[in-house]
Every structure is written in structure tokens, then in C-alpha cells.
């Protein structure tokens, strides 16, 4: 079991600050996912934990011990890369056994036992005598994970391990990683992805990174239901949250706002005194919007695009006064066509308001 503590961790490449002071406490046995846009520093942060990059400032502790200057091989960490990094000339068995053999991991019998246990866990026993080129992408990734398991690490690090797989294999391998965590509940896992579906389905807690800083840390549902700021609100959720400039009309716990493309509406947020008359941002998720009659509507407009996906229908509504359409995600196959006039509303408790600084006004 291994917990990690990052305190004021920074990383600079020359004059470029990539990680700008990260504080993070990861509990033993947690599955933590780093998410964020390309270039936000999530893979760099993972490499700092692995010891593949030097920390410019701050401290990193594993099991309470300072490891800033400890080489990767001494940190009790195993890393699974996006590219698999398998030896092409070695059979699967030898790829998985290589790390233990290199470190003298307890003799031939111990190596064999660990390899076969890991292969059985990942359902790759029939492939042990094959070369990597004889495997599918998903099978290769399972071999790479198995090679990490054999080492019995304190911490697993995954660097976008599914990004080279097709859609079906991504789902199947994601399920395998989820099962792996269930089978190894005492092993800490840190996973980097830009795919929020992976983050939402795998994580105990998600760390949202932006420009080298942590925007918010919390459970998937905390981030979805209670984003701290506009960045998190827009990043978590698919399609992204509709965010519309608004004017705050009243304060307190029975506040109302006026979106620039919609009608005045009450919001379930505690808006502080002195906010009335100031600009803000109104937010509502596409899946929270429903078709309304005129008097209950927040938005009214003309349907510009319809995407029928079977289980849901996405409509993009031009409300006239905004550069961006309002997106609604409606259940099932909905009889709506391009050019139709529609009205949209949402329950009060699903509406969000953000101040001029982008910080969320918390709900009651």
C-alpha cells in the first residue's frame, strides 16, 4: 500500500513553467485520474511521479518517504505507456518476465508463478508463446499491463494507455483496467487521459489540470454536479455545458439571472450581496434541457442542426443573439427537424451561475 503526497511541485523546461505548483494528497489504494486539454501538463506530472523527469521545486513523498532524488527503479512504481513499449523479438511470456529477471525477482519458479498469475488475471494465458506482432492492439496493451503487474508495484502509472485503440477495444480494455483495480484494491493507480469518459468511469477521484495548475479535485459526480469554475464546468460533460453571458438580477438564496439569449430565470445558488446588476455566466448542461411550452421556457429559437444517435437526439438551437447555439440532449428519437421552432427549459436545481472571475456561486 502506498500513498503519495505532492507539495508545491513545479517543473520548468528552461524559461517555460509547465507545472506551476501542484499540491495533491493521494490515498493508498485510490484510482486517481489526471485529465485536461493537450499541453496542460498531465503527462509531465506523471513523469515527475515516475522519476523520469526531475522536479524543479517542491517535494514528492511515497509512503511518507521523500523520493525527489530517488531513481525510478527504486520508487516501487510500474508504468504503462501509450505505445505499449514491448520488445518485438520476445514472446509475451518473456516480455512479462523481463523486469523480474532483470532485478533478480526471486528465482525461476517465482517469476513463472507471477507471470502466469498476471496472465490469468488479464486473460492472456493463450498468448504467452506469441510474439507481440501476432497480437491485436488490445492484447498488446494487456501484455504491457501484465508486465507491470508481475513487478508487484506499490503504484501503477498509466499514460493514456488506450489512445492507440479503436473505439470497441477502448471500451473492452477500459473494463479490464476497472476489473484490475477491483482485484488489486491496495494498489494505488494514477491514470492520465484526455478522454473524460475514461476519467468518469474509472476514477475514485479526478484531478482536472489546466495550464500546469490544478483546477479542481473530486469524485466524478462532484465535478459533474458541482464544478468550481467555468473551466471545469465546460471540460467535464459531453456535449459541453452551455455557458451564456448573463446579468445577475437579484442576490441571496432566491436569486435570478437574465441570460443574454434567454428569459429571466430563478437559480438555486447563493449569490453574494453586491452582485445584483453585475455580469456573470449562466450554465446549463445539454442533458438537463427539455422541450417546454412557451411560458416555462428559458430559451426559444430555431433548430439549426439535428443529430439523431438512436438513444439520444442532439439539437442545436439558434436563439438569435448568441454566437454559439444552445445544445440540448434529448432522450430517444425525437420528431424534430431543422428549421423547427422550439422552447427549452430545465429544472432550477440543474442551473449554474458563475461570477465575473469564473468561480461558481454554490448552490444552497
Image (spheres, rainbow, N blue to C red):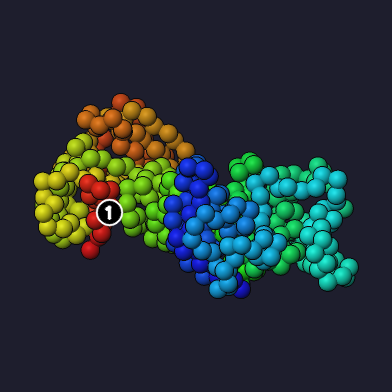
| Residue 307 visible, this angle | yes
Q: Position of residue 7 (x, y in %)?
A: 46, 64
Q: Secondary structure at mark 1?
A: loop
The C terminus sits in image quarter: bottom left
Relative placement, left or right, of 359 versus 204 is: left
Looking at this view, is 223 or 274 the one in front? 274
Residue that carries the numbered disc 1 in the rendered image: 360
Relative placement, left or right, of 210 versus 203 is: left
| Residue 28 visible, this angle | no
Q: Position of residue 96 (x, y in %)?
A: 79, 57
Q: Quadrant of residue 322?
A: top left
Q: What is the tally of numbered marks visible in this picture?
A: 1
Q: Position of residue 267 (x, y in %)?
A: 20, 53
Relative placement, left or right, of 353 versus 330 is: left
Looking at this view, is 134 or 54 the one in front? 54
Please report the residue visible at 85 percent of the width from the left and 49 percent of the height from the top.
Answer: 90
Looking at this view, is 320 or 156 the one in front? 156
Q: Position of residue 108 (x, y in %)?
A: 89, 68
Please report the residue visible at 60 percent of the width from the left and 52 percent of the height from the top.
Answer: 53
Looking at this view, is 111 or 246 the one in front? 111
Q: Is residue 110 above or below residue 327?
A: below
Please report the residue visible at 47 percent of the width from the left and 51 percent of the height from the top.
Answer: 19
Q: Is residue 114 above or below residue 87?
A: below
Q: Residue furthest front?
A: 14
Please report the residue visible at 85 percent of the width from the left and 51 percent of the height from the top.
Answer: 91
- Within 10 angstroms of label 1, few (less than 14), some, or many (20 or more) residues? many
Q: Is residue 132 above or below residue 27?
A: above
The N terminus sits in image quarter: bottom right
Amino acid at each position: 500500500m502506498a500513498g503519495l503526497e505532492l507539495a508545491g511541485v513545479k517543473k520548468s523546461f528552461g524559461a517555460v513553467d509547465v507545472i506551476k505548483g501542484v499540491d495533491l494528497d493521494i490515498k493508498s489504494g485510490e484510482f486517481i485520474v489526471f485529465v485536461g486539454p493537450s499541453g496542460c501538463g498531465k503527462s509531465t506530472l506523471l513523469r515527475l511521479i515516475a522519476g523520469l523527469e526531475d522536479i524543479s521545486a517542491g517535494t514528492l513523498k511515497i509512503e511518507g518517504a521523500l523520493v525527489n532524488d530517488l531513481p525510478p527503479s527504486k520508487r516501487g512504481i510500474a508504468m504503462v505507456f501509450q505505445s505499449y513499449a514491448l520488445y518485438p523479438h520476445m514472446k509475451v511470456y518473456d516480455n512479462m518476465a523481463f523486469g523480474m529477471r532483470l532485478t533478480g525477482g526471486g528465482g525461476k519458479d517465482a517469476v513463472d508463478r507471477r507471470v502466469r498469475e498476471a496472465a490469468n488475471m488479464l486473460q492472456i494465458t493463450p498468448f504467452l508463446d506469441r510474439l507481440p506482432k501476432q497480437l491485436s492492439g488490445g492484447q498488446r496493451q494487456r501484455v504491457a499491463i501484465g508486465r507491470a503487474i508481475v513487478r508487484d508495484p506499490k503504484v501503477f502509472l498509466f499514460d493514456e494507455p488506450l489512445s492507440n485503440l479503436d473505439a470497441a477495444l477502448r471500451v473492452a480494455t477500459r473494463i479490464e483496467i476497472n476489473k484490475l483495480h477491483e482485484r488489486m484494491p491496495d494498489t494505488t493507480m494514477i491514470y492520465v487521459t484526455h478522454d473524460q469518459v475514461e476519467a468518469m468511469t474509472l476514477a475514485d477521484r479526478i484531478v482536472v489540470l489546466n495550464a500546469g495548475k490544478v483546477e479542481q479535485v473530486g469524485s466524478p459526480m462532484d465535478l459533474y454536479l458541482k464544478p468550481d469554475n467555468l473551466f471545469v464546468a465546460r471540460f467535464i460533460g459531453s456535449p459541453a455545458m452551455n455557458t451564456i453571458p448573463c446579468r445577475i438580477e437579484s442576490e441571496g438564496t432566491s436569486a435570478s439571472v437574465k441570460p443574454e439569449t434567454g428569459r429571466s430565470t430563478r437559480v438555486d445558488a447563493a449569490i453574494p450581496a453586491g452582485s445584483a446588476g453585475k455580469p456573470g455566466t449562466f450554465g446549463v448542461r445539454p442533458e438537463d434541457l427539455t422541450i417546454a411550452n412557451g411560458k416555462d421556457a428559458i430559451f426559444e429559437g430555431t433548430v439549426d442542426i439535428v443529430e439523431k444517435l438512436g438513444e439520444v437526439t442532439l439539437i442545436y438551437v439558434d436563439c438569435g443573439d448568441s454566437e454559439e447555439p444552445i445544445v440540448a440532449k434529448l432522450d430517444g428519437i425525437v420528431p424534430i427537424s431543422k428549421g423547427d421552432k422550439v422552447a427549452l427549459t430545465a429544472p432550477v436545481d440543474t442551473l449554474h451561475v458563475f461570477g465575473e472571475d469564473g468561480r461558481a456561486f454554490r448552490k444552497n
